[in-house]
Image (cartoon, rainbow, N blue to C red):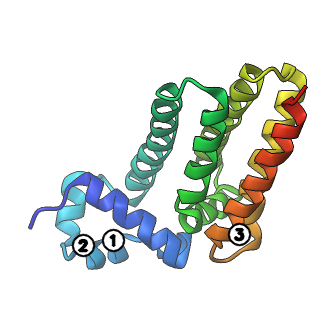
Amino acid sequence: MRQSKDDYYRTALELLAEGGVDALTMANLCARLGVTTGSFYAHFGGIRTFHTAFLEQWAEGRVYQLKEQVDATPDPLDRIDLLRRIAVAVNHEAESAIRGWSRTNPVVAEFQRRVDRVREEVLVQAFVDIGIDKKEARVLARIGLTILVGTQQIEEKVDRKRLDTLFTEYQRWLRFRVQP
């Protein structure tokens, strides 16, 4: 069975989640997909080319999905709730591995920054739309992003229920902030 590029990208996320960046090898990808290295080379020029293509797909997928869902949710309070649900549902173990990788690889770091920048800007806009001053909205958005990143860094396997509780409390604080 012929594997698509998307199959390789999906498998890369699985490998990252299970074993970190050291698990993301051509041999592991091919073994997991049940293909030969020739199949890999039919899609990618080598492992570095694959890494760049994978990261591009990962970052663009995160950004596109986020923007598409946010654009379809006009009410800012509903958007904030949507962002909570999205943040809880991401593949935290793979993202944690990407964050670790980004500390030693500037190319990976740029992809990670791109994703985080969009996440933060979407939060800032939602906060501004509910009447919070832009300067304060930036601080609040950074707090939200810090909850996500901090959880990914301190938990080997993210407890999604606990993360949801943290974000729910964060939303409760925001409701108090915007009440007259």
State the residue at coordinates (89%, 23%): 135
Residue 138 coordinates in the image, percent (x, y):
83, 30
Residue closest to the far left:
1
Residue closest to the eye, 95 or 125: 125
State the residue at coordinates (67%, 77%): 156
Query: Are the residues tagged 1 and 2 within 8 Å (C-beta)?
Result: yes
Q: Amino acid at mark 1?
A: Leu
Q: Which residue is mark 1?
A: 29
- The disc placed on residue 162 is 3
Residue closest to the eye, 84 or 113: 84
Q: Secondary structure at mark 1?
A: helix
Distance Cα–Cα, label 2 vs label 3: 33 Å
State the residue at coordinates (67%, 64%): 100
Q: Secondary structure at mark 3?
A: helix
- The disc placed on residue 64 is none
Does residue 56 appear left or right of residue 172 in this picture? left
State the residue at coordinates (64%, 48%): 84
